[in-house]
Amino acid sequence: MSGAPNTRLFDLFGLAGWSKGELARLVNRQAAAMGHPQLATDTSRVRRWIDMGEIPRDPVPRVLAALFTERLGRVVTIEDLGLVRHGRVGKRPGDGSGSHPDGVPWAPERTAAVLTEFTGMDLMLNRRGLVGAGAALAAGSALSSAMHDWLRADPALTATPTTNNPLHAEPAGFDRYDAAPIGSQEIEELERSVDVFRAWDAARGGGLQRKAVVGQLNEVGGMLTYRHPDHLQRRLWGVAANLAVLAGWMSHDVGLEPTAQKYFVIAAHAAREGGDRPRAGEALSRAARQMVHLGRPDDALDLMKLAKSGSGDQTLPRTRAMLYTIEAWAQASMGHGQAMRRTLGEAEDLFVSDKGDVPPPSWMQMFDDADMHGMQALAYRTLAEHDPAAAAIAQQHAKRAIELRVQGRQRSQIFDYLSLASACFIGDDPEQADRYARLALVSMGANSSHRTWDRLREMYRLTAQYSGSPRIEELRTEIKLALPRTSGKGKTRQV
């Protein structure tokens, strides 16, 4: 017992609107349903948790996490409630026990437990039809400050126990999965499943397969509670990182923003545990892209500094080029045209310098010439809001991206169409803009990506100056009819 109030629990308790007596009764009822009928919580004990920082014993933290998750309609973890006993894994500098967001970075022994707990809660929300909203995104500067030294340090994998005894793992893992050894064949099957999920996401968006990815990640988290030989353990952490990135990207794609950010942080932890710093950096770059999309480019730049510095010297030129394109997009969002052009120039030099003599990791195989042009188009189209002269360059890159797109990348193709249409509207070419806007509309019906609708709204705003044209007025009407009433960011939006 710390003697100080548990401010995290206090804040969430206030949001939930329970009385202390009501929460005590709910804890007893939920614990009995989870197989712990002997638990007897009362009002005074709840008061000690909140007002004096007392951390209850297992299973109470998990019971509370389940109750708050259901009540608030978003994933609430033991970390979110401030109920982690850091002494169980050893107190050390940077273990997240201070004021860092969500307690990051986690000690190595906590990563699998956090992964399993968070995915389990997320699946519970899916089953009950609740919406993961209402939490705030952590600021990019806060995440960067918390994780900077940790990410740049050597991975802690070699410092973990080398025995095949799973008893060192956190109890959370045993609640959902019976730890058992797996071999290289099972890991190969998991790696292939990641490729299948990734291809589906690129084609159809994240809405339809998100639950399947989260479920697979939950299973992998359980597998990680068993200590495998190092070469298998690293591969398993790699699978966890890839699935966590996908879960985050799919969550972002359907507007579950705090959930997405948590998965990106989990992915960075998993990648680092597996000794793959470039993958950890790429995971954080996804969080940066999320921030730009949400209109927070300053937070994105903070995250990109961390992603670039933490990726390490083994990062391939093409991966570094990808990181620079995201940084350029953030700079464009802030109207920093000179900095954006300089950053894109560095990205281009890195991209062409990659000779392909080293095979790219699986998670970089989709960043090809089309993606490079697509990101350049997006950056210039974004800058055109501040400097209309950039619209012409955006059009060139968007057209080239469309020419190069391969089959199965329908979502990226929709973004290309929308970048091109928007750049044409800004560049005073409504006839060509109308053509590409309609191509985007035709393609969006079979896609579950809310982000495409968000970009469509941005383009719709640009049509206002041409509303006197019958053709454009017809397009505006079609967009109004096509747009859902609720945006991917969870708010009702009128166009």
Image (cartoon, helix red, strand yellow):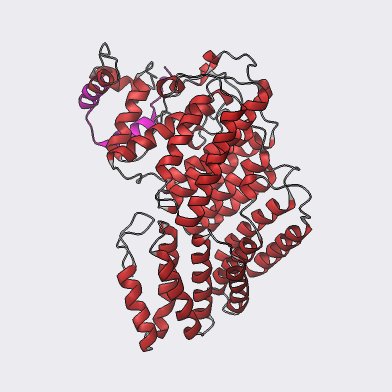
Residue at 62% across, 64% down: 370
Q: Nearer the viewer, residue 472 or 303?
A: 472
Q: Nearer the viewer, residue 19 or 278?
A: 278
When the figure is inspected, residue 274 is found, relative to residue 29, above or below; the finding is below
Residue 332 at x, y percent in the picture:
59, 66
Q: Residue furthest bottom?
A: 469
When the figure is inspected, residue 88 is found, relative to residue 399, above or below; the finding is above
Residue 116 at x, y percent in the picture:
46, 29
Q: Nearer the viewer, residue 155 or 43?
A: 155
When the figure is inspected, residue 464 is found, relative to residue 182, above or below; the finding is below
In which quadrant will I find the N terminus? Answer: top left
Residue 335 at x, y percent in the picture:
58, 68
Q: Is residue 16 left or right of residue 273?
A: left
What span is colored magenta in the figure? 1-28
When the figure is inspected, residue 444 is found, relative to residue 141, above or below; the finding is below
Q: Is residue 224 visible?
A: yes
Residue 224, quarter of the rendered image:
top right
Residue 318, quarter of the rendered image:
bottom right
